[in-house]
Image (spheres, rainbow, N blue to C red):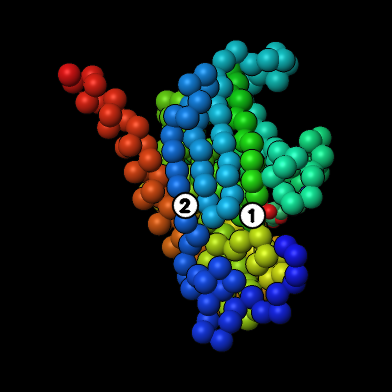
Amino acid sequence: MNEKPEKLIDKKGLRLDSRKHDQLRQVKLEVGVIPNADGSAYIEWGKNKILVGVYGPREAHPKHLALQDRLVLKCRYHMAPFSVQERKSPAPSRREVELSKVIRESLEPAIFMDLYPRTMIDLTIEVLQADGGTRCASITAASLALADSGIPMRDLVVACAAGKADDTIVLDLMDEEDKLGTADVPVALMPSLNAVTLLQMDGKLSQEEFKSAVNLAIDGCKQIYAMQKEALKAKYAGVKEEAEE
Ligand code: ADP
């Protein structure tokens, strides 16, 4: 960002990228983009570009990490040095370690972990370009990559944030709104089970504002859930036709 904008929302109620307060950025999802991985997905969400690969389940390594009664999900969220305007060090930052944990914990409830004792799944998330909301985009793409790997799941996990820009509760904050806005509430959801697997809040909101932000984020999740299912169908409808031929 070169210059700090005076207002995040103009007189007509439109945001810096001309979105309405309850409008998502453009989302594009693709499944099965890395043939060498057991499951993979690619997401473009606004200017975010994120690639996710799943490897496993395989024998846990190192062995002492294995659990006798369940699978171990190892998750690595990493931002490429060129993913933000100023070069980011390729070494894992404190933020990346925290996001790896948060993303893992929002996905684990969806996986039947106890079906795969003593094994491990490696989930690798590469943020190629970041524009705010990368944790939500990562969770959304990672659950698709897990589904693509064939691991049994209770539901897909989908995530979306809402927050406060100027005095308005807005859906899906982009980088400027994330940095200059007053609050950010990321929510992850298993929509068919109506179960929230992640709820965070950064900033300050009144109780009423918090409620409307969570409800708006859940609406956003539901819209993206439909796109997730379409992305899976786009790959697997073709596979079914091939099998029937
Ligand atoms: P999220 O991406 O989930 O919103 P944060 O709120 O921590 O996570 O980060 C918000 C945004 O800040 C990121 O999406 C990215 O665009 C930007 N950002 C994060 N780390 C850096 C960094 N090291 N340098 C520049 N921008 C960054």
Residue situated in front as seen by the camera: 122 or 37: 37
Amino acid of disc 1: Asp
Say how many tags the image has: 2
Q: Position of residue 71 (x, y in %)?
A: 57, 24
Q: Are marks 2 and 1 in contact (CB under 8 Å)?
A: no
Residue 48 seen in render:
yes
Tell me the quadrant of the picture where the C terminus can be found.
Answer: top left
Q: In this picture, is 22 found above or below 48?
A: below
Residue at the disc numbered 1: 131
Residue at the disc numbered 2: 27
Left or right, residue 177 beside residue 159? right
Residue 76, picture quadrant? top right
Amino acid of disc 2: Val
Kindly tell me whether mark 1's CB lies below 8 Å from ligand 1: yes
Q: In this picture, is 131 found above or below 80?
A: below
Q: Position of residue 206 (x, y in %)?
A: 65, 77
Q: Position of residue 72 (x, y in %)?
A: 62, 26
| Secondary structure of the residue carrying numbered label 2 | strand
